[in-house]
Amino acid sequence: MASLTTAVSAFLKVVALGYLSIQPVYASSVPQRRQSLTRPNDLPAGWSYAGCWVDNAHGRIIENTQPGNSGLTVESCIATCAGQGFSVAGMEFADECYCGNRFVNGATEAQTDTDCNMACAGNAGEPCGGPNRLSVYSSLSSIPSLPVPTVQTTNLPGNFAYSGCFTDVVNGVRALPWQIIWEGNNTAVACMNQCAAFGYPVSATEFGQECYCGDTEDLTENGSTKGADSECTIQCPGDPIHICGGVQRMTTYTWSGSLNVWHQPQNTGFYEFFVPGLMAPLLATLGVNNKVAFLEKAAGTSAAFPNSTGAYELDLSLVGDFSREWREMHTKTDIFCSGSVILPDRAGRQINVGGWSLQSTFGVRLYTPDGSAGVNGTNDWEENGDILKLQRQRWYPTAAILANGSVLVIGGEIGSNDKPEPNLEILPKPVGGDTVVNLDWLLRTDPNNLYPFVTVLPSGNVFVAYYNEARILNPNTFDTIKTLPNMPGNVNNFLAGRTYPLEGAMVLFPQHFPYTDPLRVLICGGSTPGPAFVSDNCVSIAPEDPNPVWTIERMPSQRVMSCMVPLPDGTFMIMNGAKKGVAGFGLASDPNLNALLYDPTLPTNQRISILGNTIVARMYHSEAILLPDGSVLISGSDPETPGLPEETRIERYVPPYLNNGITPPSFTISNHDWAYGQTVTISNVRVTTGSISGVRVSLIAAVSSTHGNAMGARTIFPQFNCAGTTCTITAPPNANISPPGWHQLFILDGSGTPSHSSWVRIGGDPSQLGNWPDLPGFTRPGVGAVTIPL
Ligand SMILES: *[C@@H]1O[C@H](CO)[C@@H](O)[C@H](O)[C@H]1NC(C)=O
Ligand SMILES: *[C@@H]1O[C@H](CO)[C@@H](O)[C@H](O)[C@H]1NC(C)=O
Ligand SMILES: *[C@@H]1O[C@H](CO)[C@@H](O)[C@H](O)[C@H]1NC(C)=O
Ligand SMILES: *[C@@H]1O[C@H](CO)[C@@H](O)[C@H](O)[C@H]1NC(C)=O
Ligand SMILES: *[C@@H]1O[C@H](CO)[C@@H](O)[C@H](O)[C@H]1NC(C)=O
């Protein structure tokens, strides 16, 4: 926008100058031509007169325009230029001063020296150029001169080729969506490189300093047409022998071939209505009882649902039977906006921490899932802030399980849009101890770092991504071991961020036996601070590579408040969110209704498939989680944006692998409690498609979904061997590859169709969470083996 104004005002200036320069009659304030003008001889040492030169035959011939000066003299202009370190000074039209170190735009000398016969505005006896004539002085013996700029058509990066001089701002509409202003240094090549890096096949420069990126469809959709090459004449400020557009004209280059391949499979799978809800949940967790636990703001905070009890559980086996499928549960304090994770204890308890406001921000809430298919559990959320609470107030914290089995709680603010809580703490808190560790980088990046993304790396160190930064921490001291490069943002703004409120989503690339590949993290979506330009890319990095670099992959549409769901076949659904704005109440619009599938086994920039569309806007406070049958549950949307509902409807996405008419494979398992490296047998393995040798095995770690943060997410393809009707699976080797916790075990047949999942715990409960908290009113499952039923 800024540059549109700049462009227009500059355009007006060019028109005005043209008018004044060509008209024979001048305003009375402009000095008249004189017959006898004398050049000064009191020039600074080394400076001398270099002739009267023609300006604007093909653009300005000296590059740096100084402000108009009604007191201009030859001496003052030279002093200005010399003072700025320039070696060439030119006076034009009585009161204009130009500085440079060379001529550009194919400068030629005037026919006669007397063309420069306007008196200086500040000295009626001296010549200061004329209309389109420059009196030029220089400290150089010979002034370098660049030719009239031409369109660069050779040495173009990648597969770019010149497409022509295109019109811009037709009927007030810009042709290309992404604008970059590179005052003083824009070049056609730099613009092409920048566009290509972010996946845009069209690169266009305009008005010298402007670079635009987009798609060929944008040109046609926005009415841009190809004009005569002669309409693009402005030199590139960073490369003055080449042309960077004109006034509302774009020197346009197009990448031939595909910069991104977005697959459009025939079988996209589909969204479907799943179940009517009771509220708009802000946190969803599939429990080890195979029921979905939802958490929602407390009655006082939830304007739309004043009778909210804060917690509800959905029995997936009863979907379709509204009077029986929901169980109302209760929280004592307000879980808005908290973090959750499933503990590695033998009962698979869910822990929820933080909230809003005051005592709720200290909240530590525990639920021991119970009941069974068709039978309500009786356990409820347990909390008692008098005896069990966080050490710091946290609104928007992340929870994670460390390799040693303790719980990490990190970040947040002391309340809604309040002071930062730039630190972490560990649960359980030792008696008399304090486990708070201050983190200066969270302080520095507040408030764009909330709900930071956290994961344990194969080295045992801890990765954290927050705002547009990422680093690796020592898991004992939480000192920084390595600062990673900043995450690339948007093509037009490197400062785009990825955590609330610039909210994207993070998952981990699958880890395959023998677990020797460096772990890669994938973060999709985000937005910019200030004017919210929503990101249309995913970035990924292997943090423990010797020289880690972020890879940028463009998505087919912009998305903030994205949710990502690890599927059992190692792919990821990308869904929910908006195309405009940032996360928060009333801060986004234009819902993104399209689901994507990201397949990390495909080559970079060819990994995304465009799947189905929903009719339900899933904005702020929406979630997406994997169900036991391999489909995806989508819930929530609490945007507080006029025209967009508080969404109670729950949908399901049936991915392509369940939309193929194939009977899912099946298996039975008796060992639900795996030690690291242990070999476990599953039996009655049955596939209806392909043979047993085509079977694959995956482990999807338990996830709590809130605010784009899939807390706990991890995908493991363990070592296995199948023969006859049994498979032996070797558990991942250690807690760094796979921190202690619960996983959904799937098998997939040769067609990629998943079985239903069975829950297994891997790595036990090394932090003895099962004995915690030893306080009245809390259930403690103990630290023994997992017993089924739980
Ligand atoms: C132009 O200069 C700015 C400011 O130094 C810099 O950020 C930008 O990367 C430069 N652009 C090019 C194309 O060199
Ligand atoms: C140009 O057209 C595209 C459709 O291809 C649209 O998405 C985009 O917003 C338009 N750009 C501008 C700046 O209006
Ligand atoms: C909450 O109250 C609304 C009316 O205000 C009602 O429609 C809804 O069924 C109630 N929900 C629950 C869970 O009681
Ligand atoms: C579970 O409890 C809820 C009350 O919270 C009730 O409405 C529902 O019918 C019960 N479901 C079953 C299967 O008993
Ligand atoms: C796990 O590591 C954290 C951070 O060093 C520490 O505070 C905690 O006590 C450890 N847990 C156990 C069970 O050793």
Image (cartoon, rainbow, N blue to C red):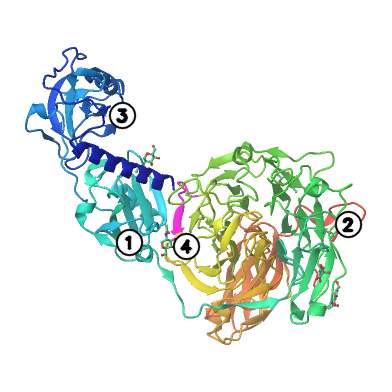
Amino acid type at image mark 3: Gln
Q: Does the magenta-highlighted stretch encompass residue 546?
A: yes
Separation (CA) of disc 2 from disc 4: 46 Å
Q: Nearer the viewer, residue 515 or 406?
A: 406
Q: Which residues are magenta?
A: 545-553
Identify the residue at image location x=89%, y=47%. Answer: 386
Amino acid type at image mark 4: Met
Separation (CA) of disc 3 from disc 1: 34 Å
Amino acid type at image mark 1: Ser
Residue holding disc 1 = 224
From the image, state whether disc 3 or disc 4 is nearer to you: 3
Q: Nearer the viewer, residue 121 or 652?
A: 121
Q: Position of residue 423 (x, y in %)?
A: 69, 41
Q: Position of residue 427 (x, y in %)?
A: 77, 48
Q: Quadrant of the C terminus?
A: bottom right
Identify the residue at image location x=84%, y=65%. Answer: 329
From the image, state whether disc 3 or disc 2 is nearer to you: 3
Q: Residues within 10 Å of mark 3 (few under 14, many from 20)?
A: few
Residue holding disc 4 = 555
From the image, state whether disc 2 or disc 4 is nearer to you: 4
Identify the residue at image location x=51%, y=44%. Answer: 484
Q: Is mark 2 within 8 Å of ligand 5?
A: no
Q: Earlier in the sequence, mark 3 or mark 1?
A: 3
Identify the residue at image location x=46%, y=77%. Answer: 265
